[in-house]
Image: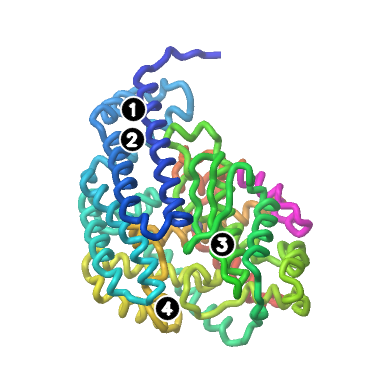
Amino acid sequence: MMTHAPNPTLQKLKARLTDLDCLGSALGVLGWDLETYMPPKGGESRADVSATLCRMAHEAFVAPEVGEWLQTLLTQLPALPTDKDRAMVQQAWRSYQREVKVPTTLVEALDRASSKALPVWANARKTNQFDAFKPLLTEIVQLNQQKAQALGYTHHPYDALLDGFEPDMTTTLLDPLFAQLQAHLTPLVNNLTQSVTPSLPAGPYPKQAQMDFSHKVLTAMGFDLERGRLDESVHPFTCGLHPDDVRLTTRLDEADPLSCLFSVLHEGGHGLYEQGQQPDLWGRGLFGGASLGIHESQSRLWENLVGRSMAFWQVFYPAFQAAFAPVLDAMPLAVFYQAVNRVSRSPIRVEADEVTYNLHILLRYQLEKDLMTGTLTVDQLPDAWNAGMETLLGYTPKNHAEGCLQDVHWAHGTIGYFPTYTLGNVYASMFWAKAEQAGVTQPIAQGDMKPLLGWLQTHIHGNGLMESPNQLVQRVTGQPLTAQYFTQYLDQKYCLKGAVV
Ligand SMILES: [Zn+2]
């Protein structure tokens, strides 16, 4: 076996990246706490703590010595001991080139603005007052415009932000993808919303029963509750602090158990990706997933391709009925299946069905692009949102809470994130086609989801950030990004004889 002399530069870089993963983990706990258990008035002081740690992390990463280490290591790349060392250097260099362009003052300002914005947004949404959120949103948009300028771009300022969530993705690639989806989805939505589909009885569906059933589903999926947990928050999310500490949240509504259940399947999919990564990627800046789009492919795969399938419900429906007995006793499986696959012109993205979902994303994509160029102002945003909903989905929001105040992303200070949801749907169907060929999806009908999870761990989860989304998609599916499998999946499920409608 070949041995390598210790490389002091490599050791220094690894030590710094371990420090940064520790700081990232600490920031993760603070963020998780802010949305779960922090008392309402803790926001101001939390903003200071979080912004300070954020500044420390940024300064530690963009320090001149890190640039020098990376320059040295790039010249030694083929001679580095392992693939992980090479990936660590390449990934750190990619992030370094991005982050070094953004002044620390701007990073701190954005983090501070978003920490303050979060409770203000939550309250504005509750009271339906866009004006309360407007000053902070204006600041967040301006700071993102500055960030795009600092990062630089060749075609559209949005590209600079997008690249931070989905490496190498651009508006030039997304515009035709969305156009293709819109052309396919609009007639499909028109068809599928003609007839009346059933909905669930009024309930009640007690919160504790929802949480208990959620834990059962997570266990069946293979989510390790000794290395993760599930809590309640306003907006469901996943926070991976380490492969051995993955926090999921869900929302609970006593009138609607499906909101919680599909959030759990969704966040559980994210959580499995986090738990499935090789543990030694953490501490090298390689933990967290290839991109947000690939991450979302895992959540959407479990939420929709598994969680809205007849195979899944054949197994789980009796337990679901029992959990809320006697409310669902008179509803047969076939009717329940129609209810969970109901297609409707509805206002809320996180509760949208899989047919209309990407139209909700297209709206946000169009608005964010215009906010970045300044052709749309924050003042005009509520009207533009409502007009876009009318055009794309034939629905006019009744208030701001079901309009432009519904999502947490802008309060988080993030612009450029939304398209990764659509990419996730598209990647998920590409991966699913391969998983079907491998014979790992069929055992779901017997309640066995282990073959599917094993396949996902082997082909997708393990490598973390060791490869780019394009490389991963090409390796797993043998072809580049295409919407073809997603549209075929919808056509087969919703249009064929014997299908849902
Ligand atoms: Zn997600």
Q: Marks 4 and 2, how far apart in space?
A: 40 Å
Which is more N-terminal, label 1 or label 4? 1
Residue at figure coordinates x 72%, y 78% from the top left: 335
Percent position (x, y) of residue 395? 44, 83
Disc 1 and disc 2 in contact, CB within 8 angstroms? yes
Q: Name the amino acid type tagged 1.
A: Leu
Q: Marks 4 and 3, how far apart in space?
A: 24 Å
**Mark 1 = which residue?**
74
Q: How many residues crowd mark 2 within 10 Å: few (<14), some (14–19), many (20+)?
A: some
Percent position (x, y) of residue 273? 56, 47
Q: Name the amino acid type tagged 4.
A: Leu
Residue 93: give its label.
2
Magenta stretch: includes residue 451: yes
| 5 w.r.t. 179: above or below | above
Percent position (x, y) of residue 454? 66, 44
**Mark 3 = which residue?**
263
Q: How many residues crowd mark 4 within 10 Å: few (<14), some (14–19), many (20+)?
A: some
**Mark 4 = which residue?**
392
Q: Name the amino acid type tagged 3.
A: Ser
Question: Which marked residue is nearer to the observer: mark 1 or mark 2?
Answer: 2
Residue range in magenta is 440-457
Which is more N-terminal, label 2 or label 1? 1
Q: How many residues crowd mark 1 within 10 Å: few (<14), some (14–19), many (20+)?
A: some
